[in-house]
Image (cartoon, coloured by chain):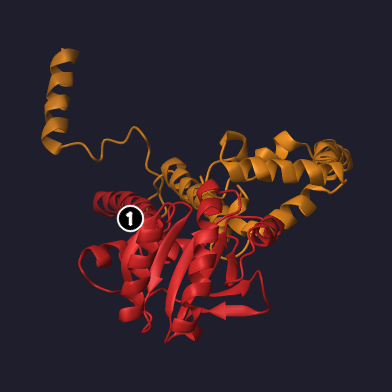
Chain colours: A red, B orange
Amino acid sequence: MRAPLARRGRRSRLSSKVLLHTFGLSIVVLLLVLLAVRLVSNGSGRRLDKALAAGKSPVAPEFSLARLNGEGQLRLASLRGKAVVLNFWASWCVPCKQEAPLLEAAAKRFRSMGLVVVGIDSQDFRSDARRFIKRYGLTYPIVRDGGSSTPTHYDVTGFPETWFVDRSGHVVGEHVQGPLTREGLLRNIAIAMKR
Amino acid sequence: MSIRCAIMALLLSLFLAAPAAASERHPTLPELEHEVMCPTCHQLLELSDAPIADRIRAFIQARIDAGDTKSEIKRQLVSEFGEAVLAAPPTHGFGLLAWLLPLFGVAGSGVVIAVLARRWVRPIRGPGKQVHPDSTSELDPVLVRRLDEELALFDR
């Protein structure tokens, strides 16, 4: 009589413990899975900067974004065979106003030699960006990523920032964080066009 | 009784819904500053002094003055900056998890507590016979014998 009772009590306590442990464990596993998904979906995490620092030329992250000063979308892959200057900017950014004429001049001067300047406007109102383009007379293609997906893939932490892509679609030269200087721009354009 | 409860619940829901409807139709800048994020510094708009935060504040005020509802203003901000501009996570895709997880957590905890409480409260029964709380069946026989001897000595 006593043995069955004790077994039932033990079994009851055991299944309660198992239930609690299973619930706790499943919560922990679920949170870990969510964390992993979030980390993976957050992108490279300064992957480009690390690769450049290691002397490598990583493939430039692909994008397809709506044009602000033209029709349709612009895909980075469609510029393969040309050297590309990728300039991240926003209309409210003061240094962006300073470097806009320099970028426009470079775009015009090197266009016939196979260079394309692409402006990527981000975290900005469309109307403000269009006003900026008109005010500074920018004729090079400008696309828009209202959120921060493309800037995140390019390790952009502020505006302006500029990357250089060679004719085969690889990131080369320097990651310029802050306004471009004439010398810095010409030096990196030369690197991108020679490769 | 149940009709009275239903009327009370209806009145309560109307009482709670009225301010929400007013806020939807006639939003204020401070309200929206509390529900919108600065896209560059990832803080609530009310805490941010970034240039884009000032620009968004000006945009919101202009839309309020133009008579837009809160939902309309939020929709326009999302079309410019994406879902991340809203402080509350979206109710679809990955953001949906942020809404569902607490509910699952509360429901799961409730189930676990209910099951455990039922087990802890339920008396342990043998096959067809209830065990009396005073039963000495689980006492050590040596202890029982010693207790009997002590009681016998006490009776003398």
Most distant residue in the front direction:
A109
Please report, as a chain letter, where disc 1 is located. Answer: A
Q: Is B144 situated above or below B75?
A: above
Which amino acid type is marked by label 1?
A: Val
Q: Residue at x 36, y 79 (%)?
A: A193
Q: Is residue A32 visible?
A: no
| Mark 1 residue element | helix
Q: In the visual, does A39 lie left or right of A75? A: left
User: Which residue is nearer to you in this view: A51 or B106?
Assistant: A51
Q: Is residue A145 visible?
A: yes
Task: Check the picture and name the quadrant holding the C terminus of chain B.
Answer: top left
**What is the x, y in percent for residue B3?**
89, 43
Q: In the visual, does A157 lie left or right of B12? A: left
Q: Residue at x 26, y 67 (%)?
A: A51
User: Which residue is nearer to you in this view: A182 or A95?
Assistant: A182
- Crowding around mark 1 (Cα neighbors within 10 Å: few <14, some 14 to 19, many 20+) is few
Q: Residue at x 42, y 56 (%)?
A: A180
Q: Is B20 situated above or below A175?
A: above
Q: Which residue, given by chain and number where applicable, does mark 1 sit on?
A: A18
**What is the x, y in percent for residue A23?**
40, 54
Q: Residue at x 65, y 57 (%)?
A: A132
**What is the x, y in percent for residue A112?**
49, 83
